[in-house]
Amino acid sequence: MNDEFKDIERMLKSMPLRKAPPSLDARILRPRRFPRWSRALVGGLAAAAAAALALALWLPRHNASDPIPEEAPPQTAGLAPAPDAAARPGPQPGHTIEETVSHVTYEGLIVPDGKTPMRVLQQRTVNRTWVADESGRFALDSAVPDDQIILVQAQIQ
Amino acid sequence: MRRRLERIYLEHRQGLFTMALAITRCPAAAEDAVQEGFARLWAAETAPRGDSVAYVFASVRNAAIDQSRRRRPASGVEQPEAASIYDGQEADPATAAMNGELVRRVARAVDSLPDDQRDVVVMRIYGGLTYAQIAEALGRPLPTVAGRYRLALERLRSQMGGGDER
């Protein structure tokens, strides 16, 4: 049977598929299952902690006599390259970077009370924490997803 | 067991996402369905019997069907546009213009398949599953799965071939 349909199978396999999003890896490989209310709380606390931590890491490094180190951006897969310790100071073991990735999708209209149309927006957020190990390389430590539904009144034309 | 499931995910992530998207017709819901499918597997107290890959595809498929039912809007409410499993975006504009129509035709043809035939095609072509694995994932006899696959390809060929002959 397979020989009979080789042409159609080949054509189907050649079609460009919509790629699985990178955020799916963070949700599957290192998920944290928390209740929805605690995820929102953790998300808020993580954002505040990230801001405080970034400030704490940034301030001591900007000494007038030291060159400003160039930090490598965190990578979603694998480890960030370890900086050259002789040329510039790198991340210390235990240092963390926290990032929040968020996007909003439009999910359609609802009319909950029969009179007022509301647009449904879904905000999906992933809070990721990267931690530097003994060699100064950052690795993804955790990814905390959070979903929120936002209702916006639609204009009646 | 968790490591085994993670290995299966890494090997089949695209096939799982494509199957979930074919059912839910929404990328966000497909992502939710894949996560929910794996969450159910992790919550299971015993290791799966039979083929692990089939077990994972079955769990994600069931989660996608549940997602699809939950997202079904009430009558009279505006529905967001259904997403295709194919990506019409091409880096080269010339290639995009040439292939865009073909991709749209194939997408329409695949979308028009009955659900049972579509699931078999997606699992086989894009998931890389064997007939035996698909049969186990769907809970159907192997001859039934093979028959649905054949019917689906015949239907796709007649829909695609009809346009080429004109």
Image (cartoon, coloured by chain):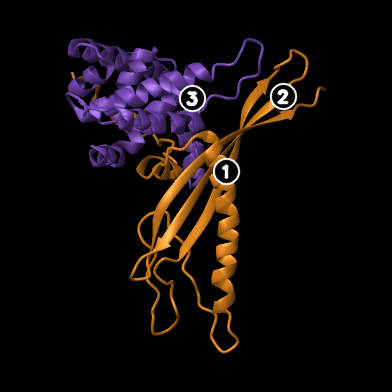
Chain colours: A orange, B purple
Chain label for disc 3? B
Quarter the C terminus of chain A occupies: top right
| Residue B166 at x, y percent in the picture | 44, 18
Q: Tell me, for residue A101, which label it has, or none.
A: none
Write down the quadrant of residue A9 in the picture. top left
- SS of the residue under disc 2: strand
Q: Which residue is mark 1?
A: A41
At 42% from the left and 28% from the top, the residue drawn is: B33
Alpha carbon of mark 3 to alpha carbon of mark 1: how far?
31 Å
| Residue B130 at x, y percent in the picture | 20, 25
- Identity, as a three-letter code, of the amino acid under mark 1: Leu
Write down the quadrant of residue B38 in the picture. top left
- SS of the residue under disc 1: helix
Q: Tell me, for residue A118, which label it has, or none.
A: 2
Q: Which residue is mark 3?
A: B25
- Identity, as a three-letter code, of the amino acid under mark 2: Met
Q: Compared with residue A10, is residue A90 higher up or lower down, i.e. above or below?
A: below
A13 vs A112, nearest the viewer: A112
| Within-10-Å neighbours for mark 1: few <14, some 14–19, many 20+ | few
B52 vs A9, nearest the viewer: B52
Quarter the N terminus of chain A occupies: top left
Res. A77 in view: yes
